[in-house]
Amino acid sequence: MIPPGLILTYYGDDFTGPTDVMEALAGEGLETVLFLDVPTSGQLARFPNARAVGVAGESRSKSPEWMSANLPRIFGGLKRLGAPLCHYKVCSTFDSTAQVGSIGRAIDEGRSAFGGTWTPVVVGVPLLKRYVVFGNLFAAGGDGIHRIDRHPTMSRHPSTPMDEGDLLLHLARQTARSIALFDILDLRASDSDSRFREMLGRDPDVVLFDGLDDASLAAAGRLIWRHRGEPQFVVGSSGVEYALLSWWRAKGVLPAPVEFPNVGRVDRIVAVSGSCSPVTASQIRWAGANGFGIIALNVDAPDDVDAIEGAMTFLEAGRSVVLHTALGPDDPGLRRAMTPESNERLGARLGGILRELIAGSGVRRAVVCGGDTSARAGRQLGIHALTMRKPLAPGSPLCRAWADDPVFDGLEIAFKGGQVGGEDFFGLVQNGGAKRT
């Protein structure tokens, strides 16, 4: 059975990924709260029925030195909450390097904080069209499924391009720990449990699980839950949660799934985008063709007065607005020499624009696009926690913001990863999850 109280804590290496986890858990009746830092006892007391607590972070865009300086405090705070599992949440594209967003360094720091004899790694999320087969990662993009090092976007990511599809080789660049693979044949074997015990007998530090379909995720969830330490540190995408939920559902120990109430259409939304994904570009173009005001931000401008004034003109005329820094990876205005420092400044800048527009217009529903952008933008609004309001697109739900400032408390906001959502995503947000007719 699932023990009472907190069942899981997690830290997201950017801001959009943790909302993906919240969507998976909350939809299965496990109340989940996402904080912007390790919560105080007073903040946590506002959510007495929480079964999962997350922290939205920014390590995906940080150096290993930053991670070693900051993750121990965060992991220590999460460990003190006493949940049996702690998940270091990464993007399902697993993009990282030894210099930026090192997942290997996170594993090293997590093992130091939580102890344990092995660290599970689950990356595949079939719901999001991310698959791991024989250790190789594949993801949907453009007109098909691509190995991640041939993906039209992730192979060209401006800060963490994926040039290796074999995750064992990719991870070995970032940590000296031993890594084993429990592949799809092992997961589907009739003697899967004995094979797994035999593997653990060889004392691997890290075990990567294949993830092709719901059945393979359920098998991984069973093995993680049965062979966990207390506490157990886990690394991966929201595939971690989907794996555990699949196993718990099979055992009949989950509460009834949640039916989220209708949130309705609003007259206007504001969106800011720091994403250079072609998926986000197509969504911005769709918005422009469907009545949204579109403003291309000049990242080299000394201030954002003109952009804010232009956006307010659209809003005062009753139109939604999207402000963006790029239309896809080939946008000629995109600065290729992106650094963690420039990303941080840009994210804070977009957050400042969003703050001014919400305060000045009275808009109560917003979108932030881009995982690296969202963390900085969210903090500019003074948000300290998020809870689930309504599913929109897989991995990007509409959330309720909790803040001390009443201007932002209760704001409905979606944090969208670059690769997430259909072409009409912004319309979906404005309509509260309903398709335009």
Image (cartoon, rainbow, N blue to C red):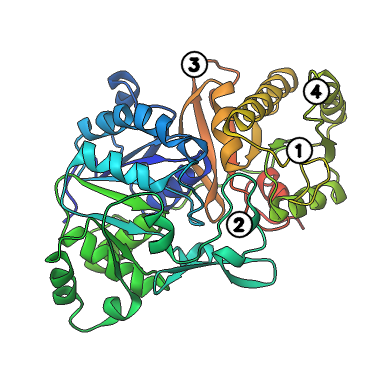
| Discs 3/2, front | 2
Q: Position of residue 46 (x, y in %)?
A: 34, 25
Residue shown at 48% from the left, 51% from the top: 91
Residue shown at 65% from the left, 35% from the top: 366
Q: Mark 1 highlights which residue?
A: 324
- The amino acid type, in three-letter code, at marker 3 is Asp
CA distance for labels 4 and 1: 12 Å
**Quadrant of res 323:** top right
| Discs 1/2, front | 2
> Is there any visible trace of residue 356 in the rendered image?
yes
| Discs 2/4, front | 2
- The amino acid type, in three-letter code, at marker 4 is Ile
Which type of secondary structure does the marked residue at label 3 adopt?
loop
Q: Earlier in the sequence, mark 3 or mark 1?
A: 1
Q: Mark 4 highlights which residue?
A: 308
Assign the C terminus to one quadrant of the image: bottom right
Q: Position of residue 304 (x, y in %)?
A: 79, 21
